[in-house]
Image (tube, rainbow, N blue to C red):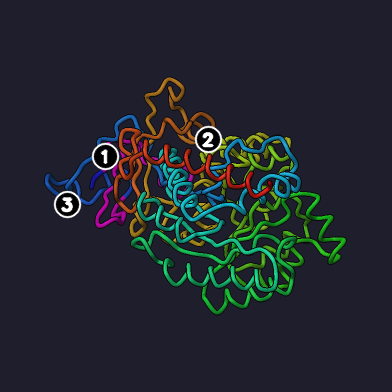
């Protein structure tokens, strides 16, 4: 496949922007990405490409990476808003989640995958239950995903969830043609005791996988752990051995300088920053500039649609930049390029996938999106990073490739029946709330 004529943005640096660019894809892998003048002559020769995409008037860039979500929570979109996190979890979300079924997870994840792809998100990192059903949906829709069975509790509950995580890894790690990988996912230090976190650290070493966890999302969480253990979430995670591994840490809002120093010792991973969810739940603003200064990778996440209400990274990108500018008092402290980087290459690094995705470079998988700049709200394009970070919306994404396969064309999902997915998800959401109501009596 040959994508030609667009402005190719490789995300290998602020200067790597090529107005008359070319991306050549072979067997799902990027063979060349850059200026037309530097392309190998054979890829430009008539007949080399089985298909050519005219990208004139489009921005061509890596697919976006959602570093933290609970995909099937789209079924609870708008169900419980305008509440504090702990109240929201304990009185609304956890009681309904107790009634979830495998079929709910399949159709919820299918809807999340469809919404994500249409918005240019080609990879998401999921923490939820019945993840084998999520894997089936990921395989069917053609998206890339890191799937994690969420682990909460201690004793038999903890053990049973660990066994489900083991089954997921054995069946799906490297599945769907390599598009699915897995991590171990203890929910948080306030829901998984230190002894169990130590067990998770040992399993991560035995199984050769990283860890996905919520850390320091709210002040309430900090107070709970200080009273119970006399330590911060980061101190607990570090002492349990989690930072000996790749760690994807969601939120990281209330981190001290010492916390950042401890977390920076992890050999990989980083912060999954979810600004929309954090503001909506009044959790606070993560100190992203401090995290970056410490050398910690930062990516963007949406969290679940039950809190963020949508799975697009465009609004997250915009808000991330604005919050850091405001917090620092310096408009240049966090640039448009920084925001786009967090949504692409930064997110790939957080998930440990930087050798596969996140930039348009030879040898990487062809996860590529085209943004149509002929839209009134994107005209004119003086600076493509400014256009992407501050002006672009999900409907501006026109074409999406994952592993070199076109999954969205002319703004339409081509890997699934969108009308069926929407109808089934709506039906599952109604049935879920009815079951939860019946269980409450």
Q: Position of residue 144 (x, y in %)?
A: 41, 54
Along the viewing direction, whichever of 385 and 309 lies nearer the viewer: 309
Cα–Cα gap, marks 1 and 3:
14 Å
Q: From the viewer's perspective, is 188 left or right of 353?
A: right
Q: From the viewer's perspective, is 321 left or right of 53?
A: right
Considering only order in the chain, which callout, 2 or 1, is on the residue closer to the N terminus? 1
**SS at mark 1?**
strand
Residues at circles 1 and 3 in contact by the CB criterion of under 8 Å: no
> Which mark, by number, is residue 42?
3
Q: Read off the residue under disc 2.
A: 389
How busy is the neighbourhood of tag 1: few (under 14 within 10 Å), some, or many (20 plus)?
A: many
Considering only order in the chain, which callout, 3 or 2, is on the residue closer to the N terminus? 3
Tell me if residue 261 comes above or below residue 333 in the rendering: below
Q: Position of residue 147 (x, y in %)?
A: 50, 59
Q: Read off the residue under disc 1.
A: 4
Question: What residue is shown at x 72% (from left), y 59% (from top)?
Answer: 260
**SS at mark 2?**
helix
The magenta stretch spans which residues?
3-32
Cα–Cα gap, marks 2 and 3:
35 Å
């Amino acid at each position: 496949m040959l994508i030609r004529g667009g402005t190719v943005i490789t995300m290998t640096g602020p200067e790597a922007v090529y107005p008359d660019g070319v991306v050549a894809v072979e067997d799902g892998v990027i063979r060349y990405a850059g200026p037309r003048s530097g392309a190998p002559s054979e890829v430009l020769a008539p007949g080399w490409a089985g298909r050519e995409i005219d990208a004139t008037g489009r921005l061509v860039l890596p697919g976006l990476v959602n570093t933290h979500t609970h995909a099937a929570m789209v079924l609870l979109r708008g169900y419980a808003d305008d509440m504090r996190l702990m109240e929201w979890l304990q009185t609304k979300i956890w009681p309904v989640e107790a009634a979830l079924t495998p079929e709910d997870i399949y159709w919820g994840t299918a809807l999340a995958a469809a919404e994500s792809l249409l918005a240019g998100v080609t990879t998401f990192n999921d923490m939820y239950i019945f993840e084998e059903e999520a894997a089936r949906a990921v395989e069917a829709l053609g998206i890339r995903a890191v799937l994690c069975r969420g682990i909460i509790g201690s004793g038999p509950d903890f053990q049973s969830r660990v066994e489900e995580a083991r089954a997921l890894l054995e069946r799906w790690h490297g599945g769907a043609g390599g598009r699915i990988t897995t991590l171990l996912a203890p929910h948080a230090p306030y829901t998984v005791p230190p002894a169990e976190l130590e067990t998770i650290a040992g399993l991560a070493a035995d199984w050769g996988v990283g860890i996905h966890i919520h850390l320091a999302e709210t002040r309430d969480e900090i107070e709970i752990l200080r009273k119970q253990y006399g330590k911060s979430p980061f101190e607990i995670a570090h002492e349990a051995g989690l930072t000996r591994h790749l760690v994807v840490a969601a939120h990281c809002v209330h981190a001290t300088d010492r916390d950042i120093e401890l977390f920076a010792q992890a050999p990989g991973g980083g912060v999954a920053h979810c600004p929309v969810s954090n503001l909506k739940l009044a959790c606070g603003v993560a100190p992203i500039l401090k995290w970056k200064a410490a050398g910690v990778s930062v990516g963007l996440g949406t969290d679940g649609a039950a809190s963020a209400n949508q799975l697009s990274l465009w609004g997250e990108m915009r808000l991330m930049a604005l919050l850091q500018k405001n917090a620092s008092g310096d408009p240049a402290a966090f640039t448009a390029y920084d925001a786009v980087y967090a949504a692409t290459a930064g997110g790939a690094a957080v998930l440990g996938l930087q050798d596969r995705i996140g930039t348009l470079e030879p040898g990487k998988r062809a996860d590529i999106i085209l943004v149509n700049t002929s839209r009134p709200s994107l005209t004119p394009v003086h600076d493509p990073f400014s256009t992407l970070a501050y002006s672009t919306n999900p409907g501006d994404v026109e074409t999406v490739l994952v592993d070199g396969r076109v999954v969205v064309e002319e703004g339409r999902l081509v890997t699934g029946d969108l009308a069926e997915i929407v109808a089934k998800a709506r039906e599952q959401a109604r049935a879920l709330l009815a079951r939860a109501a019946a269980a409450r009596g």
